[in-house]
Image (cartoon, helix red, strand yellow):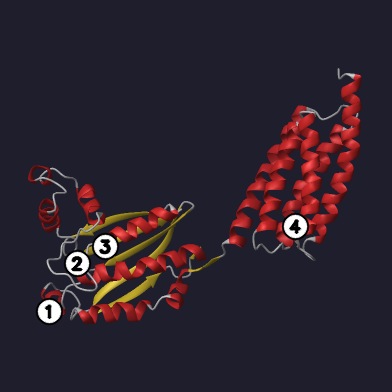
Amino acid sequence: MQSDDRQEFIKEFIENAKDHLYVIEKGLLNLQVAKDAESLNQILRAVASLKVGAEVLNIKSIEKTAYKLGKYLEIVRDRPVKFDQQLESLFMQIFDALYLLVNELDSTFGLREEVSNQIVLKIELVFESIKQQLKLLINPHVPFIEIAQIFPLYSAVKEAAAEYGKQAEVTIEGGENLISEYFLKHFRRLLTHLINNAIAHGIELPEVRQAAGKSPVGQIKIRIFYQGNQTAIAFSDDGAGIDIDRVKTKAIEKGLITISQSQTISQADLYELLYHPDFTTKNERDLRAGLGFGMDIIRTELNKVGGLITTNSTPGRGTTFTIIYP
């Protein structure tokens, strides 16, 4: 049984909580019309007061719900987020949960643990929806095909090929798939290095390709697909593939591996050498290749955003670099 003092404190908390809930409800319903810092700060003050009161009385369900609501409202206030009807609906569901928790607390039996747990469990899904919606609004997703609007993809491939006396063209597969606008712009910064690498090291001269039964025009394909909740971009060429023996020779010359190690090194570890700073298999350097910076730059740039890159190659058939964004 609760002490008289605690019952009095709870009664006072309920009275104040209803006032705070009124401010929160009114504020949320007005945000579609006028989203400004002062309006949001007013809501946030009411949410904070609700949280502090619940914390003092150790009412965890209300305290934690108010805390999370405040954190997401701060994002709405501080980031360029349009408070649309969908967001309003989600936030109002959190308000409804808080209202229900306070009303249960004010009921004859008080806020029972099983009821509290049930409400909190349901709104966890709502909070996850808010998180995903805010993520989309802060960093919108666009069709991958828009890469051609922010990077001269087709001309870049043709020009690079022409400089080496080669022919090449590029196609996009899965261009309708959506990608974070931020990651699309980030991938744009990697494209020059990927194209240069494919043309300089992968795509063969027209006569060499024809002798191997291939079209004289080398093919580069960029494919976007999803792996769980991650975005993957595969950059492939149908060229000569990675010359394993040449990579080993160059790695030995640079002191990256010993002759003994070269005989037992795995294919995956060998491919990793391609990303080592100043590593190249070309004997001569030019403005596009042979400097040993391209693949190292790609790995460095991906590390900045938590991305990964893997390598797969088949002699005579080509090479694929798969970039995975978180």
Q: Which residue is mark 1?
A: 207
Q: Which residue is mark 4?
A: 88
Taking the image as shown, residue 246 lies to the left or right of residue 104, namely left
Q: Residues within 10 Å of mark 4 (few under 14, many from 20)?
A: some
Amino acid at dot 1: Glu
Q: Position of residue 134 (x, y in %)?
A: 63, 56
Q: Position of residue 321 (x, y in %)?
A: 30, 60
Q: Which residue is mark 2?
A: 290
Q: CA distance from mark 3 to mark 4?
A: 49 Å
Nearer the observer: mark 3 or 1; the answer is 3
Q: Which residue is mark 3?
A: 293
Q: CA distance from mark 4 to mark 2?
A: 55 Å
Q: CA distance from mark 1 to mark 2?
A: 23 Å
Q: Regarding mark 1 in the picture, which secondary structure is present there?
A: helix
Q: Residues within 10 Å of mark 2 (few under 14, many from 20)?
A: some
Nearer the observer: mark 3 or 4; the answer is 3
Q: Position of residue 135 (x, y in %)?
A: 59, 57
Amino acid at dot 2: Gly
Q: Position of residue 306 (x, y in %)?
A: 43, 52
